[in-house]
Amino acid sequence: MLSVGHDVRILAIRVVWALGLLASALLLDERSVSGVRWHIAFQSVLASLSFFGLVRVTGATSSPYNAFFPFLPLILALGYPRDASAITISGLLCGLGAAGLQLADGHPWSKAVLWAGLTATTTLIGAYGSSQFRQALRAESEARLERGRREAMESLAISERRRAQSEKLATIGRLAAGVIHEINNPVAYIRANLDFLEREVLAHPHPSREELAEVFGETRAGLERVRQIIADLRGFSRMDAEGPTACSLADVVGDAVRIARLRLEHVARVEVEVPKELPPVLAVHRRLAQVLLNLLVNAGDALDGRVGSEVRVTGGREGSRVLLRVEDNGPGFPPEVLPRLFESFFTTKGPEKGTGLGLALSRELVEQFGGSLVAENREEGGARLRLEFPVYEGAE
Ligand code: ADP
């Protein structure tokens, strides 16, 4: 029969154990890594010592709890699988406790060693299991991180493409007046020619062959001009996710200038000196054309309404770099504007005309291809935008 004092001791051990658990849980700061470590270590020590006390007061080696010594480390490993200290501490304390009780109760050394060995074995099994669990957790969190990183990169690429696309559409919007004018002209004379043909063919059974040939030629040229404008704009506005390839700057400039003429035709004289033989650069052709078009349309805006306006695009090689310059003889950049040119949404043109994204986006695109874009004022007056790219070695 167990005495009252004995019951009180059991109760006291349980109360101390429970209070320890409660205090540690209340004081735990889950955001602090070392705080969590201390909490787990404390719980392991508290559980092992309380359990040892329980076994001791309920009959030591003959206690019904004694057989559970080897399993306490396993239980703690299940409770705290993320930290190896739980099983290490409880394994050590339970092994020592189980062996110590055997010796204290007068059992031979071999029995003490057997209990210590038993506890060590379950501790090792628990340690192995929890380390596997931690490894699986690590692998899962790495996979989650990698997935998150990939998703972030993909959504960044999509938003970059969208931004480039909306700036592109804004540029096309700025070209709209030029497009209407350029298409209106050939359409007007195609119509006049058709009227003439109708009149001539119906009125004269044998109209002049030379006159007819001239009218047909003119009509075809007009239609060709309209077709070219549509093809250029369609090509420019397409939104394909293309990878970089070896690009000829002469071709890129040629394409951009052809579209920019829609804006520049009646504003400035455009001169292009970009040798065909320049080494290629690694870039996305359409993106580079977008950059050039931005710079040319900006030049057109700066030159609008001035007389004797000129835009020059020149290219050359300097060592392992290829250079492009887009210059105009307009007003240039005022000193207070120059440091802010490449800021997103910085514009001096007012919200209806400018987006303030052209230069920021152009610099970003150029840098994506390993190049640089800088703006300066020319000594003789006017603006100069300098682009530099590394020569594409793969092509040499
Ligand atoms: P936006 O053209 O929509 O204003 P940008 O980023 O292309 O945006 O240009 C920013 C500012 O840089 C323009 O508002 C203008 O003040 C100035 N700028 C750009 N190109 C020229 C140029 N060739 N000459 C003078 N100022 C220019």
Image: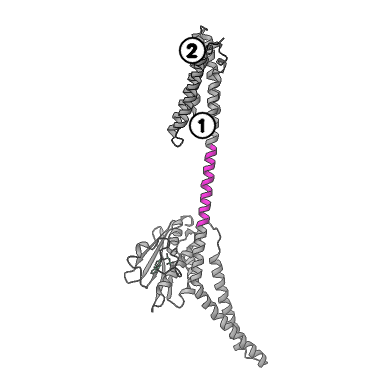
Image coordinates of residue 207 in percent, x first then y, are 64, 91
Identified by mark 2, the residue type is Gly
Q: Which quadrant of the render holds ligand 1?
A: bottom left
The residue segment tinted magenta is: 139-159
> Considering only order in the chain, which callout, 2 or 1, is on the residue closer to the N terminus?
1
* Residue where numbered disc 1 is placed: 82
Tell me the number on the disc at residue 100. Answer: 2
- Label 2 beta carbon less than 8 Å to ligand 1: no
Spatial CA distance of label 1 from label 2 is: 30 Å
> In this rendering, is residue 94 above or below 147?
above
The residue depicted at 37 percent of the width and 64 percent of the height is: 375
> In this rendering, is residue 4 above or below 33?
above
For mark 1, give the secondary structure: loop
Q: Quadrant of the N terminus?
A: top right
Residue 91 in view here: no
Residue 54 in view here: yes
Between residues 384 and 357, which one lies in front from this camera angle?
357
Most extreme residue toward the bottom, as rendered? 204
